[in-house]
Image: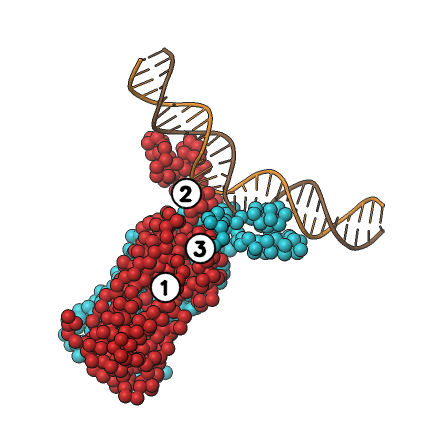
Chain colours: A cyan, B red, C brown, D orange
Amino acid sequence: MAADRPPRTTVTSYDVARAAGVSQSAVSRCFKPGASVAPAKRDRIMAVARELGYAPNAIAQSLITKRSGLVAVIISNLTNLYYPEVLAELSRRLDARGMRVLLFALQAESDVDAVLAEVWRYRVDGIIAAARLLPAQLAAIAERGLPLVLYNRLSEGEPVASVCCDSVAGETLLIDRLVAAGHRRFGIISGPADSSVSNERVAAATARLALHGLVPLLAPGQFDHASGRAGLESLLAQADGGLDALVAANDLMAIGAIEAARARGLAVPGDLSVVGFDGVGPAGWDSFRLTTIRQPVQRMTEAAVALLAERIAQPELPPERRLFAGEFLPGASARLDPCPE
Amino acid sequence: MAADRPPRTTVTSYDVARAAGVSQSAVSRCFKPGASVAPAKRDRIMAVARELGYAPNAIAQSLITKRSGLVAVIISNLTNLYYPEVLAELSRRLDARGMRVLLFALQAESDVDAVLAEVWRYRVDGIIAAARLLPAQLAAIAERGLPLVLYNRLSEGEPVASVCCDSVAGETLLIDRLVAAGHRRFGIISGPADSSVSNERVAAATARLALHGLVPLLAPGQFDHASGRAGLESLLAQADGGLDALVAANDLMAIGAIEAARARGLAVPGDLSVVGFDGVGPAGWDSFRLTTIRQPVQRMTEAAVALLAERIAQPELPPERRLFAGEFLPGASARLDPCPE
DNA sequence: TTCGCGATTGCATCCGAATGCAAACGCCCA
DNA sequence: TGGGCGTTTGCATTCGGATGCAATCGCGAA
């Protein structure tokens, strides 16, 4: 409609300065909160800026201020049903603090090195990772003075800031309730062997069972629906006398297990109790009404962003851990006594 | 372990140049594919670079080359169950082409303007949007010469590149199969009124029913599980003579509807056939075995990225649309005749 | 040994905004 | 009317890498 070839409209602070009859520094100062600019001049400049459609070039700003406003968010498997919610919340909260999400969705854990190389290049201000980082990778991050917050990951012994949902408390609660209700023959479906979340949950459940003098059967899984089905089959095959309760390391596998049980004609929770962990959306659907522990995603993401922001502002802050208690969702996939107290 | 205070280790091309006894330009050229550098010198420089842990500063590169390597991905509701897969695939494919994902997860459609302001600031190379963009917003994007690809969104009349799954073909197929199997009394649950995907699907289904001389009952929904339940209730309340088939604008609502039907003692598909759209993971679970149309996410995301990459390389390319046929998943939530041919 | 030509290399400059510093300004009071 | 002081303002420089251009190098041919 207008010019034939819009000349790659890129308005710079110089353009605004010229149009407003001031220096480039004046324009720059207009966009800096506490800067010293005469109110009248500021108004005039801002008017011109608006008219020309000027906005400070974040790239140029980053170069000189050494603050990119970018936060690398590294997530291992977005298809997990649990992470999308986390990602959405993280995005929202980082946004609220003026930071952008540079997303890295891992295909395989081995991609981490490649991802980190990009992270270095983009001079991100910090990293939030829901992925497994090796000690060498943690060291590389620390060496560059990059603030890091791990989400639901532990790094044994390494001093790293992290936000986690309390697996031990959660599994302990589940096990105690199940045992109290009379379950004795337990099966556990774990997640991938290299998942710290899975290891933690399985260890916690196993330890608690031991306290009750019980030893569970184990089946390996991959955190997905199919693993839940396969896991149940495997456990039933192992269990001579049958199974009273199944503890899955996450909801998705618990759901898979419930379906496998039903397919075999087992009623849940009539013949078998099933519990999960996470509290994802489908867990609450009628078809499953899963007994599980819901992670407080809102509070956890808020904490992660807060921890990160603090450390970006003050890099010398020590790493801290925030441990959140999950919320017990009774559901109806496990046979429990009415009230524990 | 090493120095007390690592002096904010930021290695620049000058550092590498000094250490290798060459000029900064030489270092720069080493990292540019076709550049002219003597092999021996290149090796030496790369060795020094590796030793110092040098990587070109993407921010500085962007400033001078006017290519940030960033692609803004704007997604309206990540919690949709369908988008996480899309996002993961987009991320993977952009990555493969050397581009990074700057993620914008919308809270509300009204956030788009704020998002775009950030998009301008970061000088992204292009935009992939799975969100509703207003004509004024499309114009602003076009004015800046920013390549844009819409994902599963149409922009009536506007010349914008887009990738879509063929709603008309999909719904037509579903309706034809349902009608052929004897269904006559139809109900449709739509998505949000401002969703072009929903409008398209509902319009296509309605039009096809009209061709068969049928008029469906309608219930509004929000693309979520609860809407599916509510939608079914609403439709049953409207339908005096009962309902033969329910067409939901997406899988999530179809699942909600199935659960609501069962809760009322209706068998699916015995008493009521239910079909959805998308082909999300849970649709395939035993509990639902949803009859639906699966979007070819792999091919669609590949096309989106390809369209975008082409237009970044050659901005003058005309906008094009890629329409993909969905795959019919028979499932078992609808009573159908064995074979249509 | 010298010339010629293509391959290397370095110099200088540029991208766009932020900021220390000093000059210029305005205002109040004596 | 002049001096003093706190604001505004502009100048010049900086961030880190890319690149046009001219100088230099290397090597084979005469």
Q: In which quarter of the image is the C terminus of chain A?
A: bottom left
Residue A265, which numbered label?
none
Task: Report the Cα–Cα distance between label 3 and label 2.
Answer: 31 Å
Q: Residues within 10 Å of mark 2 (few under 14, many from 20)?
A: some
Depth order, front residue of B2/D10 = D10
Residue B142, which numbered label?
3
Amino acid type of the residue tagged 1 in the rendering: Arg
Residue B153, which numbered label?
1
Outermost residue on the bottom side: it is B240
Secondary structure of residue under mark 1: loop
Task: Report the Cα–Cα distance between label 2 and label 1.
Answer: 37 Å
Q: Name the residue under label 2.
A: B56
Which of disc 2 and disc 3 is earlier in sequence?
2
Secondary structure of residue under mark 3: helix
Residue A168 lies, in percent from the top left, at 34, 69
Q: Measuring 44% from the left and 51% from the top, which residue is drawn there?
A: B145
Secondary structure of residue under mark 2: loop
Which of disc 3 and disc 1 is earlier in sequence?
3
Query: Chain under label 3?
Result: B
Q: Measuring 56% from the left and 56% from the top, which residue is drawn there?
A: A50
Depth order, front residue of A165/A75 = A75
Residue A336 lies, in percent from the top left, at 29, 81
